[in-house]
Image (spheres, rainbow, N blue to C red):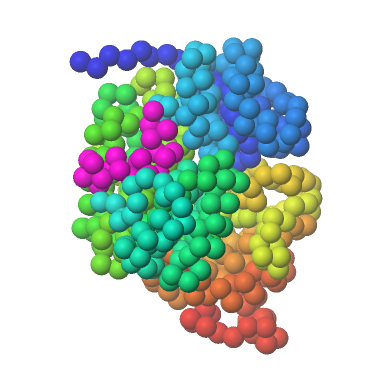
Amino acid sequence: MIKTVKRKINKLLIANRGEIALRIIRACKELGITSVVVHSEADKEGVWVKKADHTIEMKGHPVQVYLDYENIIDLAKANRCDAIHPGYGFLSESAEFARACEKRGIIFVGPSPEHIALFGDKIASKEKMKEIGVPVIEGTTSPVQSVEEAREIAENIGYPVIIKAAFGGGGRGMRIVEERKGFASAFEAAKSEAEKYFGNGDLFVEKFIKNPRHIEVQIIADKYGNVVHLGERDCSIQRRHQKVIEISPSPRLNPATRKELYRIAQKAIYRLGYESVGTLEFLVDEEDTIYFIEMNTRIQVEHPVTETITGVDLIQRMIQIAEGDKLHFLQEEIQFRGYAIEFRINAEDPQKEFMPSFGTIGEYLTPGGPGVRLDTGIYGGYTIPPHYDSMVAKLIVWALDWDGVIHKAKRALDEYYIEGIKTNLPLHRAIVEDTEFKEGKFTTAFLDRFADEFALLSTIAPTKGEDTTSFMSRLIQKGLMTIKGDML
C-alpha cells in the first residue's frame, strides 16, 4: 500500500512573472489559497503584482532576482508560505531549486527533483525512454567530445542531422546540417549558444526528421500511481524552433497514431513513477512514425488549449497533487470537446529580424465574446520592460468544429489592437487566411514556405478596426504583395 503525507497549502509563493503569475493567482483564489508574488523592481507595475494577495519586491538585476532560489526560499520561509509554484521558465526546471525547497520544508509545486534532473538532460532522458520501450530518434547517447567525432557520427547516421544542446530547450543551442560542408561552423555555433544560455556546452547529434509534425501529449499523474492523459497538442507551427501557434486536438492526426501516442505517454509516465503535470513531446513523420524528443517537467505555455477542450484546470491539479491529493477523475471521465487554438502574441519587430519591441502601450483594445480567452499581463499605459521574453499575451479561441474555430480566430485577431509597440498580430492574421492552415495541413516547415509573405505582412500593421481580408486586399492594391497559396 502506497503511503503519502497530505499537507494542505494555505499560502503559496509564485516565483514567476507576467501572465503565468496571474494565471497561478487565479487558481489560488479559487482554491482558497493566499497568493504571494515576488517581483523585480522593473515589474512593480505588472497587473499580476496588483492582483496578488501579497507582494514582495526583490532588489537586484531584473532577471537574476528570479533565478536566486536561495533568496526566494528565504522569502517564502519569512512570509510563512507552505509552497512555491515556479510557473514556466526561470527556475521551473531546476532540480537544485526543487531539492532546496524540500530541504527547507517548502512544497515545490511540480515533480520530484530526480525527474526534473532526468528530463533536463536530453541525452539521459532519451536513453531512459528507449530503455522502457519508447521510440526515439537515432543519434548519440552521450555528449560528443569534438567536432571531428560529431562529424563522423553524422556521416554514419546520414545527413541531414541536427546538433542539439544536451541541456536546455526552446530552440537554443540547435543547428540543422544538410551536408558535410558547414558542419564545423554549425557545431561551434551550437556549442557557443548552449554555453551562453544553459551554462553547459555539451552537444549531441541525431538524425533530422524532415517536415514532421510536432505533437505533444499532456499527462497528469498523482503520488498513487494514477496516470491520465488530456489529449494532444499540435505545435508544428514554429519559427526558428520557437512555437508560434498551438492547437488541440491536432486537426489531421491519424486516429491510430493518436491512440498510440496516448498509450506510449501513459505507459512511460507510469513506469517512471512520475507525479505532477508533464508534457511528452514527439515528432510524427510523413509515414506516421512516432519519435520521442523530450519531456517538459512543468506547466507549458500552451496549457490553456488543453484546459479549454477538457475543462480541467491544470494549475489547480498541480497544486492539489503537490498537497498529496489523488486525481479527481478516471481516464474515461475526461471528455474532449471541440477545437482550441492558442496564438502567442509577441512584442517583436519583424523589420529588425523579430527583435523584441519594448515600450509603452497606447490604446489597447482586447477581443472577447463566446469562446475567446486572453491570458496576458499587459494593459493600456503599461511599459513593457526590456529584460524579459517578448511574449506579452496568449489569445485562445474555441469552437465545436475546425471551421468554426478558424472563423473564431479571424474575428478575435481582428478585434485585438495594440498601439505603441510592434507585435506579431499581422503574422497570425495572415496564417489563419492560408488555405493549407484552414485545411489543417501543416508541418514544422509551414512558416518557412511562406516566409516572404508573412514577413511582409508582419511589417505593416492594419489600421484600427480593419479586418484581415480588407487589410490584405489593401496590400495587394498597393502592389505590396501578391496572392499565394489562396491566402484570400
Q: Looking at the image, is 487 positioned above or below residue 173?
A: below
Q: Give 343 or 156, whichever is nearer the viewer.
A: 156
Q: How many marks?
A: 0
Residue 135 appears in the figure: yes
Asked whether, in this view, residue 411 is left or right of residue 418, the answer is left
Give the residue at x 63% y 83%: 481
Give the residue at x 66% y 65%: 353
| Image position, residue 251 (x, y; %) | 35, 62
The answer to which image quadrant residue 278 occupies is: top left
| Image position, residue 349 (x, y; %) | 70, 62
Q: Looking at the image, is 453 positioned above or below residue 142?
A: below
Q: Give 29 or 127, whichever is nearer the viewer.
A: 127
Q: Looking at the image, is 75 positioned above or below residue 43?
A: above
| Image position, residue 104 (x, y; %) | 52, 13
Residue 51 magenta: no
Give the residue at x 27% y 23%: 224
What is the magenta segment's predominant secondary structure? helix
The answer to which image quadrant residue 161 occupies is: bottom left
Quadrant (top left/top right/bottom left/bottom right) for the N terminus: top left
Asked whether, in this view, residue 45 is left or right of residue 440, the answer is right
Residue interval drawn in magenta: 114-134
Residue 243 appears in the figure: no
Q: Give 10 or 85, whichever is nearer the viewer.
A: 85
| Image position, residue 93 (x, y; %) | 49, 35
Residue 118 magenta: yes
Q: Give 221 or 214, whichever is nearer the viewer.
A: 214
Asked whether, in this view, residue 370 is left or right of residue 413, the answer is left
Asked whether, in this view, residue 262 is left or right of residue 423, the answer is left
Give the residue at x 73% y 26%: 57
